[in-house]
């Protein structure tokens, strides 16, 4: 009788084990797995986001080094640094593109020596608050192209130009403008009139905003 009772109990246990799904998770175990996955995903995003930011920062610094070399070459050839405009927005509207690639004066327009752009004289005076470009001249003796290696993604129409086809030097790195709008470029700012960080030379920098972080990367 005792053996029969024991066998009945064993058969009952086996039946319960057969009915229970093999490898099934309880609700608590499932929630724990989901939590671990979420934590790992967050860590991965932080790591990849940080790596991407460092990559972009390195790209900006490389572009900065290249541009400072060109500006110093301008100084060696011209005897002075590219000038800064006199208007209230001069630092945000540098004439670097036109000064570094050089222009040819054609009466009512400037033609850049790289053959890419033309600029109306009146628009140039209004936008940059300058009477002309230092690195410019008539057809017989035009300016000098100091930056022949400038790539097409290294300049764009200035966002404040309102369709006047006025160019500005940029770094092709994603950032945000002051209003928080995503841009695919950063505009170089420049000051040779009264530089605060490099007296007697020039300050060159970009303001890089992305999310809540803001950085200034320049030659100082």
Image (cartoon, rainbow, N blue to C red):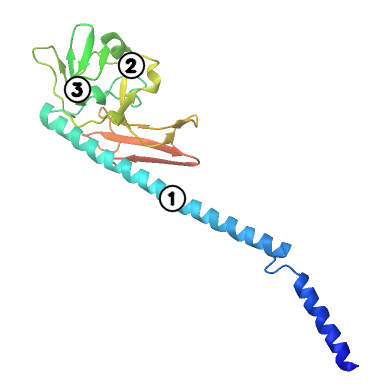
Depth order, front residue of 198/115: 115
Quadrant, the N terminus: bottom right
Q: Secondary structure at mark 3?
A: loop
Decide: is 196 above or below 136. Answer: below
Q: Residue 50: which numbered mark, if any? A: 1
Q: Secondary structure at mark 1?
A: helix
Q: Disc 2 and disc 1: Cα gap in Å?
A: 36 Å
Q: Residue 114: which numbered mark, if any? A: 3
| Mark 3 or mark 2, earlier in chain | 3
* Count of residue discs: 3
Q: Disc 3 and disc 2: Cα gap in Å?
A: 16 Å
Q: Hey, which quadrant is residue 209 in on the image?
A: top left
The x, y position of residue 173, in whole percent, is 37, 37
| Residue under the image location 54 percent in, 54 percent down | 41
The x, y position of residue 161, in whole percent, is 37, 17
Q: Residue furthest bottom?
A: 2
Q: Secondary structure at mark 2?
A: loop
Depth order, front residue of 36/198: 36
Decide: is 57 above or below 24. Answer: above
| Mark 3 or mark 1, earlier in chain | 1
The x, y position of residue 85, in whole percent, is 28, 21
Quadrant, the C terminus: top left
Q: Residue 79: which numbered mark, if any? A: none
Q: Are marks 2 and 1 in contact (CB under 8 Å)?
A: no
The x, y position of residue 94, in whole percent, is 30, 25
User: Which residue, given by chain and number where applicable, does mark 2 sit on?
Assistant: 165
């Amino acid at each position: 009788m005792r053996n029969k009772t024991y066998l009945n109990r064993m058969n009952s246990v086996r039946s319960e084990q057969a009915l229970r799904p093999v490898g099934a998770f309880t609700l608590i175990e499932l929630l724990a797995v989901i939590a671990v996955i979420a934590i790992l995903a967050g860590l991965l995003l932080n790591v990849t986001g940080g790596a991407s930011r460092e990559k972009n920062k390195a790209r900006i610094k490389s572009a900065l080094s290249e541009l400072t070399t060109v500006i110093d070459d301008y100084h060696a050839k011209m005897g002075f640094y590219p000038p800064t405009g006199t208007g209230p927005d001069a630092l945000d509207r540098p004439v670097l593109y036109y000064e570094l690639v050089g222009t040819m004066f054609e009466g009512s327009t400037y033609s850049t020596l790289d053959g890419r752009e033309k600029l109306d004289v009146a628009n140039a005076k209004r936008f940059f608050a300058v009477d002309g470009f230092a690195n410019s001249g008539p057809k017989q003796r035009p300016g000098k192209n100091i930056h022949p290696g400038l790539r097409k993604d290294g300049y764009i129409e200035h966002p404040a130009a309102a369709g006047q086809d006025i160019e500005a030097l940029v770094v092709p790195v994603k950032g945000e403008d002051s209003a928080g709008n995503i841009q695919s470029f950063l505009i170089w700012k420049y000051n040779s009139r009264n530089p605060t960080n490099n007296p007697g030379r020039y300050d060159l920098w970009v303001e890089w905003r992305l999310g809540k972080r803001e950085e200034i990367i320049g030659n100082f």
